[in-house]
Amino acid sequence: MSDSGELLIEARDVHRWYGEGEARVEVLRGVDLLVQRGEYVAIVGASGSGKSTLLSILGCLDRPGQGTYRLGGRDVLSLRDDHISEVRLREIGFVFQSFQLIPQLSTLENVEVPLFYAGVPRRERHARAKAALERVGLGHRLSHRPTQLSGGEQQRSAIARALVHDPPLLLADEPTGNLDSETGKAILALIDEIHAEGRTILLITHDLAVAKHAPRLVTIKDGEIVLDQSTRGI
């Protein structure tokens, strides 16, 4: 990463462990990660390497046992839980491998969920969710429930939900993990487009071919970052 530009993510000496004494398991061991606003970074590592734990901390779903984390210049770890929930709701969009759509809701209603919790009026929620679905190519599937959608359409719906409140940061955890290769390529192409529009993206994957879509590749092993490089020429 170059030294110029505005930092969006600043994590320093981040440790995370579970258990105590002889049962203590170290998951993250002094991770330092700086990400500029507008960057697209892939974090790659084997199962159990600590990459999903790191994403949980960066997404304000978990707190480190030691270290500092600033998001957009704000010391997240000094905030109360209710304020952290506000940060998570308004500043971070999540895309998961398992889609995590609510089966009883329509596609449109699923995308409206973050806006509902943010207190956005119904008419505005509807319009913004519809625009987000049109952005990902699902303007014709508004009334369908998740079980009526293909895997690719479900992931597009999840991406629309992640973007509907216009967060500066998009976190994607194995976003192609439940998709066939061709559908996965289409989802990665959509993420590429979203990055080109100026969004900051962190993508977690165990697949180097997926990671190569990002200009910057961070490799984590046994809870430590062992490599931070450009994907150009890899």
Image: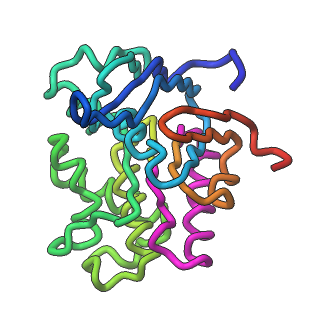
Residue 182 at x, y percent in the picture? 61, 78
**Residue positioned 35% across, 40% down in the render:** 56
**Which residue is farthest bottom?**
148
**Which residue is farthest right?**
233
Quarter location, residue 169:
top left
What colour scheme does the image use? rainbow
140 sits to left or right of 89: right
Q: Is residue 34 placed above or below 105 in the rendered structure? A: above
Q: Magenta segment range?
A: 172-201
Residue 132 at x, y percent in the picture? 40, 58
**Residue positioned 20% across, 54% down in the render:** 123
Q: Is residue 95 placed above or below 137 in the rendered structure? A: above
The N terminus, quarter of image? top right
**Residue positioned 16% across, 20% down in the render:** 80
Residue 209 at x, y percent in the picture? 68, 61
Work out whether residue 167 or residue 8 is closer to the camera in this orientation and state it. Answer: 8
Quarter location, residue 83:
top left
Q: Is residue 214 placed above or below 85 in the rendered structure? A: below
Is residue 183 shown in magenta? yes
How many numbered markers are drawn? 0
Residue 234 at x, y percent in the picture? 81, 50
27 sits to left or right of 60: right
Work out whether residue 230 or residue 185 is closer to the camera in this orientation and state it. Answer: 230
**Residue positioned 68% across, 39% down in the render:** 216
